[in-house]
Amino acid sequence: MFRNYIFSAYRNLLKTRFYSLLNILGLSLGFSAVIFILLFVNDELNYDKHNLKHERIYRVHSAFKIGEMDDNFAITALPLGPAFKLEFPEVQEMVRIARINDLLIKVENKEYYETQFFLVDSTIFDIFTNEFIYGQPENALTEINSLVITESLSRKYFGDQNPIGEVVESGLNVPLKITGVIKDLPMNSHILYEGLISIITGVQGPVEDFNSFEAERFWSVNLFTFVLLNENTDIDALSQKFPAFYEKYMKSVGDQINATFTPVLTPLADMHLYNRLKADLPTGNIAYVYIFVAVGIFILLLAAINYMNMATARSARRAREVGIRKVVGAHRGQLIAQFLTESFMMVFVAVIIALALVGICIDDFNELAGKKITMELLTEPFIIFILSSIAFVLALLSGSYPAFYLSSFLPVKVLRGSLSSGGRNSGWLRRILVVLQFTIAISLIIGTMVVNDQLRYLKNKDLGFDKENLVVLQLQDTSFRNKVIPFREALLQHPAILSVTNANGVPGRSNQKTVMRIESEEGWKDHAIMLTQADYNYLDVLNIKLTDGRNFDRNMGSDATEAAIINQAFARQYGWDEPLGKKIHYDFEIDGSGGRILKVIGVVADYHIQSLHNPIEPYVIMLNTRPAFMLLLKVRGQNFSETLAFTQTEWDHFASGKPFDYKLLENMLSEDYRNESRIGMIFELAALLTVFIALLGLLGLSSYVAEQKTKEIGIRKILGASVGNLMKMLYSELGLLILIAFVLAVPLAWWRLEIWLESSFVYHTDINPLSFLVAGIAAFLVGLLTISFHLLKVVRSNPVEAIKFE
Amino acid sequence: MIHIQQLSKVFRTDEVETTALSKINIQIEQGQFVAIMGPSGCGKSTLLNIIGLLDNPTKGSYSFVGHEVSAFSERQRASFRKENIGFVFQNFNLIDELSVFANVELPLFYQGVAPADRRRRVEEVLKQMQMEHRSKHFPLQLSGGQQQRVAVARAIVSRPALILADEPTGNLDSVHGTEVMELLKKLNAQGTTIIMVTHSQRDASYANRIIRLFDGQMVAENLTHHAESLIA
């Protein structure tokens, strides 16, 4: 019996090649999209879960309230971890992880800039799961100047040999001894460390100071702290002890600076998707996971709809077969099995093709999604289970309507031919399904356009400073930094290098916050304020406009230590109507002594110091007292490579062997929007795919309509209908369906996109109604074009042929 | 009204050339009722299609009410057709999805007749065909005879000078067949020219002139007794 089903399903697929092809194409495209989405979502949801103890690992983050401002940081103070372990018996172990930016590592004569090196406590291996290839976790990081590296780094430095005991030079100005090699971390690790250095290595000054629990030290946050809790620890109960902890260790300082602090615990596995904190490493976003899943469901739905539509459309042809089978004794269950066999076979073929497609496209996918997923993941039982369930549901869903509908035909009616093709009801269903498809497709087209609008807005918005033709150099070590003035002078010899500034931050990068005292009518007030220290040229190089007062001036001796320039937001926020001459107390001790009093000499127009995700905050610029680590070159746009070559020559001259590295400010800024441009591309792909699948469906339907209406069109032509009349008749229905889809899609898309823009960006484009119009018209036009393929043929054929057809 | 001279129609496929009509000469005057007879495949329908401006001849001339139409473009044929010719088919060729009223209304719609005018004329012609009580029904709800009456109503609603009927009784029982033939006779009596293809000697007897085709050629023409009496 089953063989009979398979055989007749196979023959049916072959007999209606065109429809089968459209269906299989739609289903396999849909299914490959779903596989990718599944891989992506699986990867995102499993961040850090390779750690066997992940359910007991928490990150401590810092919730500050300074004055009226709430500030949440992913990092904590140095002594917090040890104090936690001391205070709370629930804390079985803790590890501190401090990031080192761009560490120079020198192996024999080769130099590398490493971006994934961290200073860590030796307890890291008790908490996180790492497999050692060489060395032992127990003692790998207990000694000063020890370094544990990953397998691929070991291969990069030393080839295939065992590197234990090898010594490398480092930008920390001490030699580091390799004490362990661990397996590379899975890509979906929040902290993707490649090199781990014992934390004591980074300690400057006496070790006693490093380990002290002095209250002041709890207020300067600079590294990640993770804790391993005992099994079955009640997090709420533990958190209730935090106020007492604050009281004991931190309150004395907090009261002086008008601030409070609360530690917050986040489960390790939630860090990647649910945390949005300052000073964190790049995270994912659960919203994008939802978007992905929604897109996947849409695409699958579309493909299933195509199948249903075409199957019911052809039902008239199949009706006869059903009638005959019933007359010769088939009962309904057997017919349902028969039709389901067909849809299962179709889905099976589609899945095979989809897997091949995934194999072909996986590299492009990885690039787009920023992942390193391999096909091997598809052999995991969980993934196989999910995929086969989806395939099963898909086959059932797309096969069910034809199966249950067709099998319900009464043989007498069918064979007498009084069943008009497809029936009136299925006609309605088809229309609803087409509307649904186009609602989805139009929504996604609108989404694509709005996301692109926003990307364009981000790219083109006047940020209040010049970002073009700015080269950023980072001066890694102090000896190089001390030569910054001659280096700068040498650079300025080149006619294409217009000006140079030395600063410890550029817009979008390294703008730390510091607690300052600000003059107000009620005396001094403490506030955490964003700060850049730079030289005299900073405003000129970035072309930042002054609205009041003056720029720093070399001829004013006091500027070097006493001048500050603020932005308009600063004056607004702290109620300074006449900001010039107002005072800011900076760099003071906890008790308020020492430091410097700065006077405001100028006010700059608000510019975007941070990405457009953030509002413009109060901000201070002051002159640096020591050479800073960033050098910003304003260059001419022409002959850029020649200018760059010159810069490198000078670099090599001054940097005493440090490898040359540069960035363009414009590129650094656009990195902040990498997530958005990724979303933009994903939207584009999804829109393309859904539109394509929807069009496949239309193509199938229109071919059916063309077939069905051949006679009617012939009659109408004989009675005098022109080609125009007929087109109008045939297209008006499609037009109406697309119009309905449009009307449904507009509020849906508008509402969703408005939420996205509002929640993700402080500064965003307005949704342009034109996008909606364009999306609607585009959908209509491609729809028109698609159905024209079949309908035009019929409309233009000789009517005599059509009516002879009977 | 119709002058056909040396008219030929050749169908070509890649390999085969079939001559459907060969050097036909016919003249039909206004008000005649002509039956075209002959065995299957003799070219009857081809001739009817050419006369009905559904197809162009390969050679020869065809003049319709003084216009040489043999070289008309598709568009010209269509506009000429809808103003001058009504069609009745063996299988009725009604549109199943449209009501009786809408089916009859179609030619007027395509001629651009105003809606009120259309309504009046459709009602008029349905009354004439005694189908006014069925105007809201759909074709599949009617008997074959009724369907053909609707088809005739549709053919005459635009008041064409010529009606072409392709085996109009072929799908009808004899009672309904007679009914339709009587209808055509009545229309002819009112002045409409009718050309009818038929196999049936009985139907042909309603005509006043019979043209016989065999293998694409005219083999005989005789006036029936009706015509003879008319001329006499």
Image (tube, coloured by chain):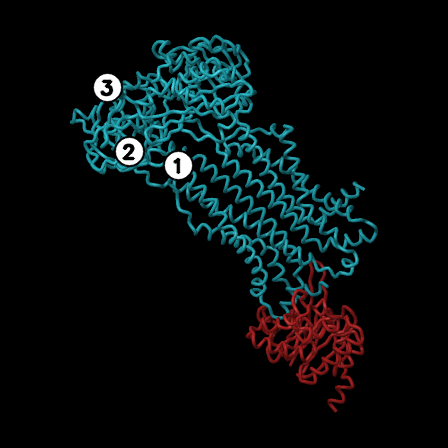
Q: Position of residue A240 (x, y in %)?
A: 46, 23
**Chain letter of the residue beneath label 1 in the structure image:** A
Q: Of callouts 1 and 3, which one flags the residue occurring earlier in the amino acid sequence?
A: 3
Q: Colour in which chain A is shown?
A: cyan
Q: Looking at the image, do the residues carrying marks 1 and 3 touch, with CB atoms under 8 Å apart?
A: no
Q: Is residue A542 left or right of residue A26?
A: left
The type of residue carrying mark 1 is His
Nearer-the-camera pick, A781 or A66:
A66
In the rendered structure, which amino acid carries the disc numbered 3?
Gly
Residue matched to label 3: A594
The red chain is: B
Q: Vertically, is B178 above or below A496?
A: below
Q: Amino acid at mark 2?
A: Leu
Residue A577: x and y in percent read 22, 38
Residue placed under numbered mark 2 in the picture: A542
Q: What is the x, y in percent for residue A141?
A: 47, 11
Which one is closest to the eye, mark 1 or mark 2?
1
Q: Which residue is mark 1?
A: A613
Per the model, the C-alpha gap separating discs 2 and 3 is 32 Å
From the image, state whether disc 1 or disc 3 is nearer to you. Answer: 3
Disc 1 and disc 3: Cα gap in Å?
A: 36 Å
